Amino acid sequence: MQTVTLNNGATMPILGFGVYQIPPEQTEQAVTGALAAGYRLLDTAAAYKNEEAVGRAIRNSGVPRDELFVTTKLWVQDAPAEQNTERAFETSLAKLGLDYIDLYLMHQPYGDVHGQWRGMEEAYREGRAEAIGVANFHPDRLVDLIVNNDVTPAVNQIETHPFFQRAADQELMSGHGVQIQSWGGFAEGRNNLFTQPLLSEIGREHGKSVAQVVLRWLAQRDVVAIPKSVRPERMAENIDIFDFELTDDQMAAIATLDTGASLFFDHRDPEMVARLAKHRLDS
Ligand code: NAP
């Protein structure tokens, strides 16, 4: 598996498996399938409520821990942020049944982000989070976090797909040593992504599916992707992207699909800020 090197020297697979919206009772089977298909990067979050099932699948897989790259995420929660972050981190470790996390991400750019970040820095210094990063940070918030703290996030996981490509954001992040990671790489199928004519045509030229073209396009841009699927045949399809290469013309053609706008929601939308800030996890 191709890897990227993070700003602390850690390596991360360029392609992994995401478990958002997989119900807890289906997650163990899905992750077991993904590990059997060859995925080694797993992306979960406290807010997905399926960390325990991810942990069970890891334990039963027989895959050595040091071959895995496990990401989970801190939810926006009550103050005081530093203590709360430590508690949330311990809870995630316990649910996953792990003694360290490869990458711990701040899930949303809300609340006491600097307090949360200091709590995350503590887990990083103790070596229990091998890397720390953020998700859904627009450039202004990201730079604010970087310039006011000691540790620069290793990763920013943001909505990135053919209709919202984030090239300028990627450039800014890369200038600060922050690795871009795509969530919603297929835009969850919105805008009829899987039958989009240009992507379908490029797929035909390579004997590949639209899903494979999209994941290959992300990999060629050095964007880490974590597609989600509960179907074993799609898990196998989505990891089979390392035997072909998109041409410069094809990369340039895909660039024209960018609308520059989210297909989900803007994290700067005041209504969404208020709604997510009210969302509390039970434990
Ligand atoms: P996604 O990966 O863009 O799309 C998943 C959808 O595509 C599912 O409906 C899946 O259906 C379908 N699919 C997968 N492979 C396919 C294929 N080869 N052909 C046709 N359809 C296919 O969406 P996502 O789950 O939202 O994003 C990926 C991961 O990013 C998440 O699981 C999560 O780990 C992370 N994420 C993070 C954030 C954040 O705020 N940090 C937000 C959203 C997501 P089936 O399952 O039925 O195959």
Image (cartoon, rainbow, N blue to C red):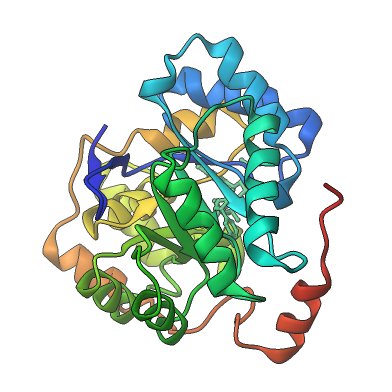
Left or right of 226: which side holds 8? left
- Inspect this view and state whether residue 20 appears: no
> Image quadrant of residue 197?
bottom left
Q: Where is the N terminus found, in terms of image quarters? A: top left
Which residue is found at the position 61% from the left and 31% from the top? 231
Q: Pinpoint residue 98: horizontal percent, then vertical percent.
A: 57, 26
Which residue is found at the position 87% from the left and 50% from the top? 282
Left or right of 218: which side holds 182? right
Question: As displayed, is residue 126 above or below residue 180?
Answer: above
Between residue 23 and residue 44, name the one nearer to us.
Answer: 44
Question: As displayed, is residue 229 above or below residue 201?
Answer: above
Question: As displayed, is residue 42 above or below residue 225?
Answer: above
Between residue 77 and residue 6, name the one nearer to us.
Answer: 77
Between residue 134 and residue 82, name the one nearer to us.
Answer: 82
Q: Residue furthest bottom?
A: 270
Q: Residue furthest left?
A: 248
Q: Pinpoint residue 12: horizontal percent, then vertical percent.
A: 32, 41
Q: Residue furthest right?
A: 282
Left or right of 90: which side holds 155? left
Label count reads: 0
Q: Pinpoint residue 75: horizontal percent, then vertical percent.
A: 68, 59
Which residue is found at the position 37% from the left and 50% from the top? 215
Which residue is found at the position 37% from the left and 42% from the top? 15
> Image quadrant of residue 59?
top right
- Inspect this view and state whether residue 11 appears: yes
Q: Pinpoint residue 266: horizontal percent, then vertical percent.
A: 60, 82
